[in-house]
Image (spheres, rainbow, N blue to C red):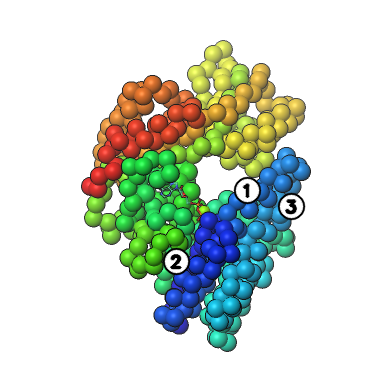
Amino acid sequence: MPLLVMKFGGTSVATLDRIRRAAKRVGVEVAKGYDVIVIVSAMAGETNKLVGLVNETSPLFDAREYDAIVSSGENVTAGLMALTLQEMDVPARSWQGWQVPIKTTNAHAAARIVEIPTDNISAKFAEGMQVAVVAGFQGIGPDGRVTTLGRGGSDTTAVAFAAAFGAERCDIYTDVDGVYTTDPRICEKARKLDKIAFEEMLELASLGAKVLQTRSVELAMRYNVKLRVLSSFEEMDDAAGTLVCDEDEIMELNVVSGVAYSRDEAKMTLISVADRPGIAAAIFGPLSEAGVNVDMIVQNISEEGRTDMTFSCPTDQVKRAEKAMADAKAAGAINFHDIVADTGVAKVSVVGIGMRSHAGVAAKMFKVLSDEGINIKVITTSEIKISVLIDRKYMELAVQALHDAFELEKAA
Ligand code: ADP
Ligand code: ASP
Ligand code: MG
């Protein structure tokens, strides 16, 4: 039997009525002759609520307990989706991550999928089951404890299942009708793309466009999964949404194809650290061990053998970063005068494969921001993207101004 993976995000399963509508879509594919693996997220808002409970209970929480708690939202929707399908006379059952089992690494709260054995679910399909409903976002680590794949991780569960089962397609149903040139919720001129190259989607996702989790795009690229993003709120249409595909399948190539932003960034500066060989390792080693995801790094000019070191990380990791640095200082591994956290910044990035062969994108980006009176605090670049850290209050303005300046509302 041909097989499809259909993933429904939080807003697509937010109420029993929405679950019923999602189940109807699944029913349509089953009627066409497909076996379907449905991956579900928690109901909208549920994971945030659970994360809030964890933080309130224990700010520097044990990540294994965090996973036990925040993974629970998906268990509820998986069961509800299976029951709804059964009510429609579609043979279905639910699986939690450990029952498959979805084997992951031990990196709690940011685990990676290592293996998905297919025998268990395939045997049920062979017995006549038509839909396997799997709780997204969760797995089981080598220590036998529940893990989660990082926020937005159900996308990755979906792509990993599509790869493991050789699915014909992996459809990601969400609350927008595809991937846009930027977030349509903050820029009304954002344009929907019919196709986007894996590499561009990878950059956009890793720079904050949460429509797909970064790791899901990496997996789709590696295993050549046919990945589509579409709305669960619109009429079913086989040509709908955005196809994430190889670069050579795309005719139109803009120099810049998208603008991404990440709201929850913090800029941390260690004031007056010794400028000596090994200092970066002495700072970033303990940060990494503490589970801090450092993004941008700038070492300022040095004066009399001392320098300031600036880095960015997600705002919710500031406390961890401060503690890791205080501990390293107490242990004598590093010495600094002060640590300053600026939690009012955001990262805005422009992305495009065309940048490989076009100069001047950075200069244009800096000019646009300067014309708007926006100060740039940190800059980083790669072959196909430029990112800046700016005050959060200018984030939407920056996204809109860049979208205008690079004429993203027009197709190439
Ligand atoms: P789900 O709960 O279905 O997983 P998410 O909230 O994780 O949905 O992702 C969908 C959201 O991603 C959209 O509502 C939109 O606001 C946001 N988004 C950010 N950047 C983009 C983009 N370039 N194209 C489409 N959506 C985007
Ligand atoms: N429910 C999880 C989250 O909100 C996973 C997901 O929706 O993909 O991050
Ligand atoms: Mg999501």
Precedes in sequence: disc 1 or disc 2: 1
Whether label 1 lies within 8 Å of ligand 2 gets the answer: yes
Q: Which residue is at a point 45% across and 32% down the rendered structure image? A: 395
Q: Which residue is at a point 43% across and 22% down the rendered structure image? A: 375
Other-residue count near label 1 (Cα within 10 Å), few / some / many at <14 / 14–19 / ≥20: some
Locate residue 397: give its quadrant: top left
Precedes in sequence: disc 3 or disc 2: 3
Please state the horizontal and vertical placement of residue 78, each as a whole percent of the image.
61, 67
State the count of labels.
Answer: 3
Other-residue count near label 2 (Cα within 10 Å), few / some / many at <14 / 14–19 / ≥20: many
Which quadrant of the figure contains the N terminus? bottom left
Q: Is 392 left, or right, of 352 in this rendering?
A: right
Q: Secondary structure at mark 2?
A: strand
Precedes in sequence: disc 1 or disc 3: 1
Q: Which residue is at a point 39% across and 56% down the rendered structure image? A: 177
Please state the horizontal and vertical placement of residue 101, each as a whole percent of the image.
64, 69
Three-letter code for the amino acid on which mark 2 is drawn: Cys
Q: Nearer the viewer, residue 74 or 305?
A: 74
Three-letter code for the amino acid on which mark 1 is drawn: Asn
Please state the horizontal and vertical placement of residue 220, each as a whole percent of the image.
44, 61
- Mark 1 vs mark 2, CA separation in Å: 26 Å
Q: Is 103 left, or right, of 25 in this rendering?
A: right
Residue underneath mark 3:
65
Q: Is 62 left, or right, of 96 in this rendering?
A: right
Please state the horizontal and vertical placement of residue 263, each as a whole percent of the image.
51, 37
Residue 285 in sight in this render: no
> In the image, which disc is placed on residue 48?
1
Residue underneath mark 2:
170
Point out the residue furthest to the bottom here: 127
Residues marked 1 and 2 touching at CB (< 8 Å): no
Three-letter code for the amino acid on which mark 3 is drawn: Glu
Whether label 2 lies within 8 Å of ligand 1 gets the answer: no
